[in-house]
Image: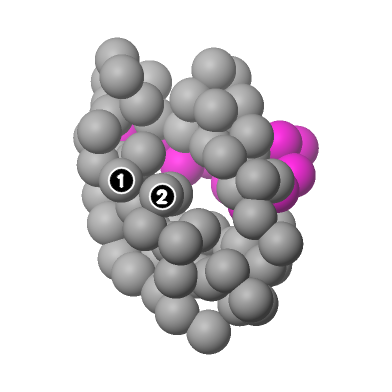
Amino acid sequence: MVSKETTIINATGLHARPASVFVSEAKKYECSVTIKDLGKGTAPVNAKSIMMILAAGLGTGAKVEIACDGPDEQAALDALVALVESGFGE
């Protein structure tokens, strides 16, 4: 398992379109992917589920931990962290 902390920087947080983009990217990989809001101290949620992502309420400035576990975990982690740090192109 690999994980990395990053910060949500786009203006709308991980809602609607950015959440959809994040889930679509996560689903490209065989490994399991979770995302956790470090500020709220809540349990990690399945990053391949749009409903779980939206329910997590990850807003702008949220410090999150993305964790991947499985055969392509490092590639998935690198891609998802890059996506978050790019601000989802917004």
Q: Residue at x 45, y 79 (%)?
A: 2
Q: Residue at x 65, y 77 (%)?
A: 70
Amino acid type at mark 1: Ala
In the rendered image, residue 55 lying in the magenta stretch gets the answer yes
Give residue 73's position: percent from left, percent from top.
54, 71
**In this picture, which residue range is highlighted in magenta?**
47-60
Q: Secondary structure at mark 2?
A: helix
- Answer with the quarter of the image where residue 63 lies: bottom left
Q: Residue at x 63, y 39 (%)?
A: 23
Q: Secondary structure at mark 1?
A: helix
Q: Is residue 70 left or right of residue 12?
A: right
Q: Please say if 16 is above or below 58.
A: above
In terms of depth relative to the viewer, which is nearer, 75 or 89? 75
Do residues under tags 2 and 1 come within 8 Å of each other at their CB atoms?
A: yes
- Which residue is tagged 1? 82
Amino acid type at mark 2: Ala
Give residue 21's position: percent from left, percent from top.
55, 28
Q: Please say if 87 is above or below 75.
A: above
Structural crowding at the residue carrying mark 1, measured as other residues with C-alpha within 10 Å and reported as few (<14), some (14–19) or many (≥20): few
Q: Residue at x 37, y 58 (%)?
A: 78
Q: Could you give the CA–CA distance between mark 2 and mark 1, rounded to whole angstroms?
A: 5 Å
Let me know if residue 62 appears in the view. no
In terms of depth relative to the viewer, which is nearer, 40 or 82? 82
Q: Is residue 8 left or right of residue 65?
A: left
- Which residue is tagged 2? 79
